[in-house]
Structure formats: C-alpha cells, structure tokens
Amino acid sequence: MKKLIRDKIPEIIKWKWEKCNYYIANGVEYNKELLKKIVEEAIEVQNSKNKNELIKELADINEVINSICENNWITNEEIETSRLDKLKIKWWFEKWYIYIFDK
C-alpha cells in the first residue's frame, strides 16, 4: 500500500526509530496521489466528531487543494471565478434542500 504523505512525515517516523520506506513521485503520479488524498481527507471531514476535529480536517483539505492548484497552475482567482459562475446558475446552499433520488 502507498499514499501521499506530508514532507516531514519520514523524519517524524525516523525519530520514533521506525523504518520508513518512501520515494519521491514524479509530477503525474504526484497529481494522481493528490486527487486520491482529497478523497481521503473528505472522508475524514465526514467522520469528524466535533468542531475542533472538523477545523483540523478542513485545514488538511485546504492544504491538499492548495497543492493541487499549485501542481496544475490554477490560481485562487480562477477558482473564485468558477465558484461565482456556478452561483449564477445553481445558487447557494442556503435553503438546505435534500434531493431524494428515485431508483
């Protein structure tokens, strides 16, 4: 099994006198692993049990989003423009609608 880890994790593992096997991904693999990482972090957000945990997990998601953007040359302005464009079509989440799917 493998997964993307933060830069300091190998050092932390070594401090505990544990073996740490890792390698540095190429750009394509790094991007693929970032996209897997955001799903992992989203699940951790979903499983948060309190506000403190939620804040920490949202911070992790934010870090992954920032890394995805950096790796794909996407600016915050591009994301904000897209978000505002979607608001014009789909609006917000203010009314708390839950869609019921018919199978």
Image (cartoon, rainbow, N blue to C red):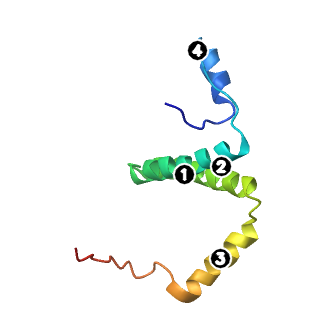
> From mark 2 to mark 1, how far is it between C-alphas?
11 Å
Question: Taking the image as drawn, is residue 2 in sight?
Answer: yes
Q: Secondary structure at mark 3?
A: helix
Residue ID for mark 4: 19
Mark 2: amino acid: Asn
- Residue at image location 73% in from the left, 57% down from the top: 72
Callout 4 touching callout 2 (CB < 8 Å)? no
Instruction: Point out the tag, 2 or 1, that comes first from the N-terminus.
Output: 2
Mark 3: amino acid: Ser
Q: Is the residue marked by circle 4 packed among few (<14), some (14-19), or many (20+) residues within 10 Å?
A: few
Instruction: Point out the tag, 4 or 1, that comes first from the N-terminus.
Output: 4
Q: Is residue 16 above or below residue 54?
A: above
**Toward which corner of the image does residue 83 lie, by quadrant?**
bottom right
> From mark 4 to mark 2, how far is it between C-alphas?
26 Å
Residue ID for mark 1: 38
Mark 2 or 1: in front is: 2
